[in-house]
Amino acid sequence: MTEHPGDYDPEADIPTRRRSDLHRPPQPAPVAPAAPMAPAAGAAAISSPTIEPDPNAGGGPGIPPNEPAPRDRGWWERNKWGLILLPVAIIVAVAASSWAMVTFWYGDGPHDVTAAKVGESVDFRQEWQDVNGKHTREVTVTVTGIAPTTVVENYDGEDEEAVTPGGTTLWRVSMDLSADPEQILVGCHVDVIDTEGREFSFESIHIKKPLVAKVSPCLNAGERGPDWKLTEGQKPSEPEPRPEKWSTVADVLMAEDSVPARVRIWWETPKAIEVPISPTS
Amino acid sequence: MSSGWRNWFAGRGRSLGAGALVLAALAVGRVVTDQLPDAKAVGSAPIERVAQIGEVAHLRVGDVKVVKVQGGKVWSGIVEAKTTPGMWVVADIEFTPRRDEGAISLATIRDDAGHEWSLGRGISTCKLGIPGVPMTCQVAVEVPAKAMSGAELVLRWNPYDRRWDDQAVIPLTIDDESAATWAKNEEPIKIPLAKVGR
């Protein structure tokens, strides 16, 4: 097939045309301006309407020669916005999928920590809820020290010589607390974290004697204060009025090779108080 | 080839060809995906620490060593006893937790045919340890009274979520002889509370 300037095939030159030109009708082939005078014999071909356009003068067949040739942009320039937005998209994708970490385990840990020094008072405040509704826990806590001990405070608040499993050591954490006597402070936890990051909780299950140790690490025997209500129909316990200020101890069983490094006091995660500590504190 | 066909292949034909190639690539990708294991499952599969009886398996939650395996029709704890029409496989374990919540809460027995018997009515006393303090404890798993090819005891921390964490795998020998012996053993296997400390 012979190509003529007037035979327009819209798809014939797709590889050589820009997308925006696909539906643009072809411009007529350029025609040299008419000669003001009768052309000379040698110039007749120049003024002919069938002259082929100079391939170097324009964008090729179908592209107006007067339109500037499309600039040959490099790959980086053509993909500039995609490259700029790629890191943003990655960050958004990671953030959008990070809910799993938060939901499954992060909220279970004591990550909202108020740090304090030994002897420094911390005004601890936390919203919480039981069957009776929402409450605000407000208590001031001061960790005053930690030392090895051979006795354990029992259920009656008396120190009793302890019998513990082989390979363990008892440490006594001393604390001063103050709070409104109407504050509900049951449910307190005291942990000691050693220099290897191992966590040891206040509990008495492995202490062979006394058989029943102190119930709450933050409260003294007979001074529990008001109780929380965990279930409907829960019978109120005997009132145990609590003073505004009191000192108490928590005896924590640790591995015998442990060296205490931090004391953590908390009621409900993620809020906690942490006090860096050493046995000489 | 005429110029019209050439132009067609250079234009719309090229687009159709590219589309066909994309579809073919998608189809091949689908076949490959179906044939390969699920990447998420492989990536989150538990890490297995194989240890023989008497060897220590170092897990994230602590060091665990199976020191003895026995079997019988009955196990007897401090408050209950359980019989089985099959047999109980009971493992005596030395466990030193590394973490506050260190425990062996999952014990299963599996064979090389893909069967797996979970803790079910069995028991694990390897809980509530103290980090860094060794404890002796037991697990009991109920299985059919028959030989098992490639039997293995699997011990791990968490029975609910098997992703990413590690687990101890202890090869067992449950052949015709041991299965017959254990299936006839009516003497209750004692499972006391765990002993914590040396």
Image: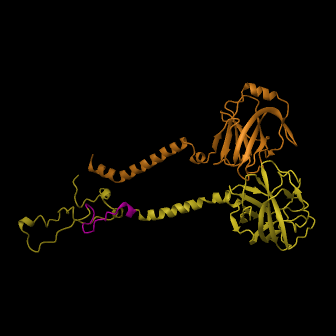
- Residue at 27% across / 62% down in the picture? A62
Colour treatment of the image:
by chain
Relative to B180, residue B34 above or below: below
> Quarter-wise, where is residue A236 in the image?
bottom right
Chain that is coloured yellow in the picture: A
* Left/right of residue B19 with respect to residue A101 in the rendered view: left
Does the image show residue A186? no
Classified by dominant secondary structure, the portion drawn in magenta counts as loop
Which residue extends farthest top? B177
> Does the magenta portion include B123?
no
**Closer to us: B78 or A127:** B78
Q: Position of residue A23 (x, y in %)?
A: 34, 63
**Closer to us: A134 or A168:** A168
Chain B is shown in which shade?
A: orange
- Residue at 84% across / 68% down in the picture? A247
Does the image show residue A170? yes
* Left/right of residue B157 with respect to residue A34 in the rendered view: right
Q: Position of residue A224 (x, y in %)?
A: 88, 66
**Closer to us: B153 or A118:** A118
Which residue extends farthest front? A280
Relative to A88, residue B1 above or below: above
* Left/right of residue A200 with respect to residue A239 in the rendered view: left
Q: Which residues are magenta?
A: A60-78
Which residue extends farthest left? A41
**Closer to us: B69 or A153:** A153
Q: Position of residue B105 (x, y in %)?
A: 74, 46
Relative to A11, residue B174 above or below: above
* Left/right of residue A209 with respect to residue A126 in the rendered view: right
> Does the magenta portion include A67?
yes
